[in-house]
Amino acid sequence: MSLPKVNAPEYTLELPSTDEEILYRPFLVKEEKLLLIAQETGDETSMINAVKSIVQTCILNENLDVSTLALFDLEYIFLNLRAKSVGETAKLKVKCPDDEKTMVEIEVFLPDIKVVVGEGHTNKIELTKDMLLEMTYPRFDLVTQMKKLYGDLTDIEMSFHMMADCMAVLYHGDEEYDMMDHSHQEKLDFLDGLTQDQFMKMQKFFDTAPKLSHEVEIQNPKTKKKSKIKLEGMQAFF
């Protein structure tokens, strides 16, 4: 007779980007083992693939491909998975900003971590009076592809490729251009033709895009000075 299986509890969560409700379970020992192995390698690609695999396995909604999710959606799901699977608090070491060297340990309550949208954020960028560019958020699979294809480029070059890949639809007067119908190089050439002011509008889209964010107050034990710091992105909480 085979051993009975232990039924894992199920939880619901709303995706920040769409308010769609998803059903998930905590990750099990086999999935935690996958994560620990990836952490031991110290390889970023291995960590990314482990996170993707764990989230895909633990989401119980049919036909939901995590690689198509916005990056902040996937990070938010994984943070909640971690809270339900390992514990709702995480101990982190952060650097005091007043001397840029002293490290202090803090404890963060993971359910307090939310996806925050920057002030004035919009995905519709008015380039001219008759030209509007609609952007899409970086997807998980796009971010991993970018690291693979353009990992040896500078940060500035990487940002141009990211912008090009996130352009969704261009409206020019009565004309509508689906950017998926145009090559990557065409989109890069389009970016090169923008004015500085237009380019800064596009940059603001990324600077104010939704992200995991949490503000904490710390005190430097050496200088006794208190400071507020922001923890942003999934990696900041592990």
Image (cartoon, rainbow, N blue to C red):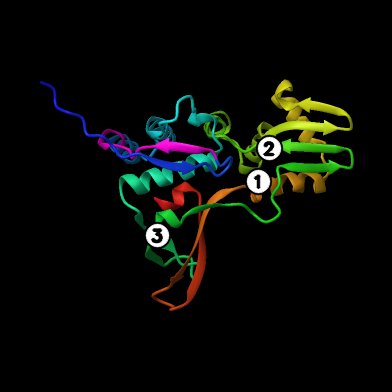
Any part of residue 98 in sight: no
- Going from N to C along the chain, the mark reached first, 1 or 2, is 2
> Which amino acid type corresponds to the residue marked 3 in the rendered image?
Val
Picture layout, residue 196 above or below residue 46: below
Q: Nearer the viewer, residue 140 or 44?
A: 140
* Amino acid bearing label 2: Met
Mark 2 Cα within 10 Å, few/some/many (few <14, many 20+)? many
SS at mark 1 in the image: helix
Q: Residue 117 location, x and y as percent?
A: 61, 52
Drawn side of residue 125 relative to residue 156, left or right? right
Give percent across and percent down for residue 227.
50, 71
The residue drawn where x is 35% and y is 53% is 88
Residue 206 is marked as 1
Q: To which residue does mark 3 refer?
A: 108
Relative to 220, 146 lies left or right:
right
Spatial separation of the CA atoms under disc 3 and disc 2: 33 Å
User: Is the C-beta separation of discs 1 and 2 under 8 Å?
Assistant: yes
Q: Read off the magenta span.
A: 20-31
> Can you tell which quarter of the image residue 30 is in?
top left
Quadrant of the image occupied by residue 1 = top left
CA distance separating discs 1 and 2: 9 Å
Occupied quadrant, residue 11: top left
User: Residue at 42% across / 61% down in the picture?
Assistant: 94
Q: Secondary structure at mark 3?
A: strand
Residue 218 visible, this orientation: yes
- Mark linked to residue 163: 2
Q: In front here: 129 or 44? A: 129
Kind of residue indicated by mark 1: Phe
